[in-house]
Amino acid sequence: MSNKVCVIGAGASGILAAISAKEQGADVFMLERNTKIGKKILATGNGRCNFTNVDATEYNYNHPEFVKSIFEQFGPDHTVKFFENLGIIPKIEDLGKAYPYSEQAASIVEVLLHELKKLGIEIIFEIYVQEIKIQNNKYIIKTQHKEFKADKVILTTGGKALPKSGSDGNGYIIAKKLGHEITEVFPSLVKLNLDYPYLKQMDGVKVKAKAQLIFNEQVVHEESGDVLFTKFGISGPTILQISRFANQLLLENKTIYIKVILINDLKVFELVNRFKNLNDKSIEMALVGLIPNKLIHPLLKEADIFNFNQKTANLSGKDLKKVLDILYDWRFLIVNSKGFDDAQVTAGGIDLAKVDQMTLESKVHKGLFFAGEVLDIDALCGGYNLQWAWSSGYIAGKYAGKKI
C-alpha cells in the first residue's frame, strides 16, 4: 500500500517532517510558497541562527505537558546529534544557546537542502495552498495552479509572524475548515508601544537595566539586560522577552506598565551620599555619569523638576525622593505592541485539544498532522522556538511516514 505524504511549508518544521517521513519509507513531496526553503531560518539569531537551546525543557513553553511528550521522543540532544550528522558543529554560548560553528544561518539551510536532495524529496516552489479536502480517504490539496493528492498531509505553514517569510496565517484558515479550533493569536517577541510624553527625547538610548511587567501593582514577568528606548516606545532583548505576557494581558483589556529599574547595584543611601557630595552642582550635572545624558531631562520632568540648573543643595527632600524613586522605579504605560510584521514569533494557534500529543496527528481526521508554529506552542528568545520546530516536525514526519 502506498503512503504518499504531502508536507505543506518548507520551513524548519516542514523540512524535518519531510526528512523524517522519508526515513520511514514514505513517498514525500513538499509544497512551498517561496522560491527557496527555510526563509525564516535565515533571519534567526541576526543571521547567525540560534538553532537550538541545549538546556531547553518543556517548562520553557506555554503548554509544558504537551511539549514534554514530544521532547521525550526528539529533544535538544537529538537535535544536536541530527545536525552533527549533517556536518553542523554546535557552538554553545550563554544560557545554552547553540549556533552553528560557522555562525551562519545559511549553513543550516544548506545542509538541510542537501539532505532533502539526497533523499530525493521533491519540493515544488512558488505554490500556494488554498484549501485541503478529503475524498475517498485521500487528501486533495488545492493550490492556485493545480490539485495534488496524498494519503497524508503535514501542515507546517507557520504562524503570522514575519509574513515576508511566507507566514500569513493561512494554515489557521485551512485547519479551521477541517474542523480544528484556533486560539487567539497575537505577536510575541515584539517591540512595545508606550504612552509617554518624552519618548522623542529618549529615542536611541540603550541601557543595561532590569525591566518588570506590572499589572495591579504585581510583577508579572521580569527580565534583565539591554533596554532600548525608541520614539514609539521600548525595545531590546529584555523587552522582547516580556512582550508575550504584555500582549496576552492587553488582549484581556488590562492596564499594564513596564517598570524600568535603571539602578540595580547601588543602594539608596549610596545615591543620597552622591547627591550630598555634589550639592554645589545643578541637579542636571549631579545625574551626569549616573544615567545616559538623554535620559536626564525626561527623568527630571517626570519628577516635576523643570529648573534643571537648580542647585542640588536647594532641592527639597520631597523632590530628591522623587528623583531617587524614578531611578529605581520608572514606569511607562503600555498601549499595544508592534504587529506581526515586526514580531519574531506567533503566540496562539491550532488548539491542542484536538491534536494527539504523542504523534501530532489530528483527532478529527486520520492522516492529518501538524508541526511547528501553526500549533498553539511558543516560547521566549533563546533557540526554544526553533527547537520546537525541529522536534515537532521530526515527530509528525515519523508517524505520518509510517504505513497505514
Image (cartoon, helix red, strand yellow):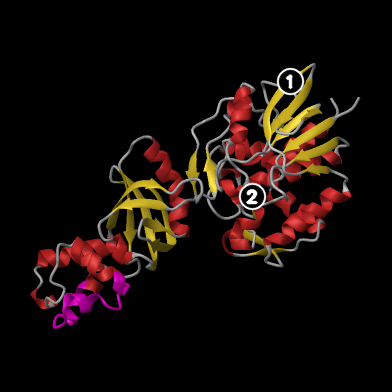
Tag 2 near tag 1, CB within 8 Å: no
Name the kind of residue labelled 1 in the image. Ile
Q: Where in the figure is residue 378, as x and y percent of width and height?
A: 56, 43
Camera-side residue of 162 and 241: 162
Residue hosting label 1: 134
Name the kind of residue labelled 2 in the image. Leu
| Residue 127, picture quadrant | top right
**Against 306, is 182 above or below?**
above
Magenta span of residues? 272-294
The answer to if 282 sits in the magenta stretch is yes
Q: Secondary structure at mark 1?
A: strand
Q: Could you say which disc has been placed on residue 386 in the image?
A: 2
Instruction: Count how many numbered circles sit on residues in the image.
Output: 2
Visible residue check, residue 72: no
Q: In screen coordinates, is 304 left or right of 188?
A: left
Q: Where in the figure is residue 120, as x and y percent of width and height?
A: 88, 45
What is the crowding at mark 1: few (fewer than 14 residues within 10 Å), some, or many (at least 20)?
A: some
Q: Where in the figure is residue 132, as x and y percent of width and height?
A: 70, 26
**Against 402, is 46 above or below?**
below
Between disc 2 and disc 1, the foreground one is: 1
Counting residues from the start of the chain, the first of labels 2 and 1 encountered is 1
Q: Secondary structure at mark 2?
A: helix
| Residue 325, picture quadrant | bottom left
